[in-house]
Image (cartoon, rainbow, N blue to C red):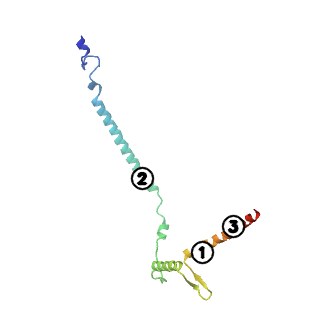
């Protein structure tokens, strides 16, 4: 009897019921796996069909392209061309303007009107504004010192 207390239970002795492998139904698991795969495949087919349906519906309901887009295409005007190369002439004009904005020169030498680089002009304006602000602040400081 002492030996029976230390024996490992048999799979068929009734204390643990049926064998463990018999509790798991392999065909049942396979059927559930197949059913889930089938449901997923049907869901994908339904989604694919709905996408096609709604894409066709949206394409049919879409308005035709605007004729304004065609009207906005760059075209040269008919008749005599006043400029042979409009893009090149525009680039040349912009280069000349950039040169004038970054150099010194006379606008009207007789009247004494000149142009200076724009960076220098901005620095001079900033310095003048700072000097004006300092001049306005100086009398207030003098008034405060005289009252003390």
Mark 2 highlights which residue? 55
Report the Cα–Cα distance between label 3 and label 2: 71 Å
Q: Is residue 58 depicted above or below 110 in this figure? A: above
> Which residue is denoted by mark 1 in the rendering?
124
User: Outermost residue toward the bottom?
Assistant: 110
The quarter holding residue 135 reads bottom right
Q: Earlier in the sequence, mark 1 or mark 2?
A: 2
Residue 137's label in the rendered image is: 3
Label 1, label 3: how many angstroms apart (C-alpha)?
20 Å
**Image depth: mark 1 or mark 2 in front:** 1
Q: Do the residues labelled 1 and 2 touch (CB within 8 Å)?
A: no
Residue at coordinates 46% horizontally, 69% vertically from top-left? 70
The secondary element bearing badge 3 is classed as helix
Label 2: few (<14), some (14–19) or many (≥20) C-alpha neighbours in 10 Å: few
Specify the quadrant that holds the N terminus. Answer: top left
Location of residue 77 in the rendering, given as x and y in whole percent from the top left corner: 48, 78
Q: Residue furthest left?
A: 3
The x and y percentages for residue 45 are 36, 45
Number of numbered tags placed on the structure image: 3
Residue 103 is situated, as x and y percent measured from the top left of the image, at 52, 80
At label 3, counting other C-alpha atoms closer than 10 Å, the crowd grade (few under 14, some 14-19, many 20 or more) is few
**How far, Cα to Cα, is label 1 from label 2?**
63 Å
Residue 110 at x, y percent in the picture = 61, 89
**SS of the residue under disc 2:** helix
Judged left or right of residue 58, residue 144 is right
Q: Say which of marks 1 and 3 sits in front.
A: 3
Residue 141 shown left or right of residue 91 in the figure: right
The answer to whether residue 127 is above or below residue 106 is above
């Amino acid at each position: 009897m002492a030996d029976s207390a230390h024996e490992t239970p048999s799979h068929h002795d009734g204390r643990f019921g049926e064998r463990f492998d018999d509790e798991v139904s392999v065909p049942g698991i396979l059927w559930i796996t197949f059913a889930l795969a089938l449901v997923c495949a049907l869901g994908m087919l339904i989604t694919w069909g709905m996408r096609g349906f709604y894409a066709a519906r949206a394409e049919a309901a879409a308005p035709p392209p605007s004729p304004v887009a065609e009207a906005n295409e760059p075209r040269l005007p008919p008749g005599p061309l006043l400029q042979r190369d409009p893009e090149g002439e525009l680039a040349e004009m912009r280069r000349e303007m950039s040169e004038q904005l970054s150099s010194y020169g006379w606008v009207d030498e007789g009247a004494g009107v000149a142009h200076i680089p724009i960076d220098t002009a901005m620095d001079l304006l900033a310095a003048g504004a700072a000097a004006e602000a300092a001049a306005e602040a100086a009398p207030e400081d003098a008034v405060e010192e005289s009252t003390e």
